[in-house]
Amino acid sequence: MRTVLELLRRLEGAAVAALMIVMSVLYAVNVGVRELASSYAVKFAWIEEACLYALAWLVFLGLGLALEQRRQIAMTSLLERLARGVRRPIKLAIDLTGLAFSLYVAKLSLDITLLVARSGQASPTLDISTGWLYAAMPVGFVLLGLRYALELFSTDGRLGVKS
């Protein structure tokens, strides 16, 4: 199980890093073309759209990684002041709420993604289904829900807040 989770973690991290690099390079090319050869700028109009898709995927793929690395916004000052016995039930409630919310949003966003994909709507310059843009949300929230579930069922002491 740990090897599967480690593989997932590495794949997510690699995807987020690759998307960030691709976006940076594409934006640099786009700016360069606009500044140095503005007559060719029209041929590179697709870059804006590609970067929009990449940004959506980057944000939603990063949700689970951010939670796992405790980089999400959290109100920890009060929680850290509480006795260890009180922290556990509160952390459990937070993780249960996070899991329920993640799965709920994943379901809603999957419904929207399928609706958009079935509509046949395509992006103007890339001419690919806008369903691919919307698909980032259910994937990201399923991965976030997985991280909350791992926190709930972990046996290695991660359930409580770090002391």
Image (cartoon, rainbow, N blue to C red):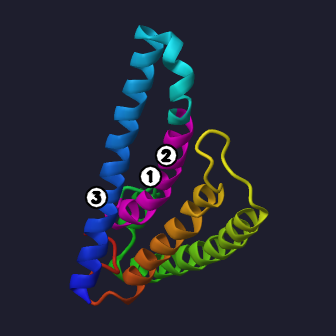
Contact, mark 3 vs mark 1 (Cβ under 8 Å): no
Please provide percent x and percent y for residue 69: 31, 62
- Neighbours of disc 3 within 10 Å: few (<14), some (14-19), many (20+): few
Quarter of the picture containing the N terminus is: bottom left
- Neighbours of disc 2 within 10 Å: few (<14), some (14-19), many (20+): some
In the rendered structure, which amino acid carries the disc numbered 1? Leu
Vertical position of residue 2 compared to residue 19: above or below: below
Figure quadrant of residue 148: bottom left
Residue at the spot x=41%, y=58% of the render? 62
Please provide percent x and percent y for residue 106: 61, 72
Can the viewer see residue 139?
A: yes
Which residue is disc 2 drawn over?
A: 55
Element type at mark 2: helix
What are the residue bounds of the magenta stretch?
48-70
Which numbered disc, 3 or 1, marks the residue that appears first in the sequence? 3
Which numbered disc, 2 or 3, marks the residue that appears first in the sequence? 3
Which residue is disc 3 drawn over?
A: 14
Looking at this view, is 57 or 143 the one in front? 57
- Neighbours of disc 1 within 10 Å: few (<14), some (14-19), many (20+): many
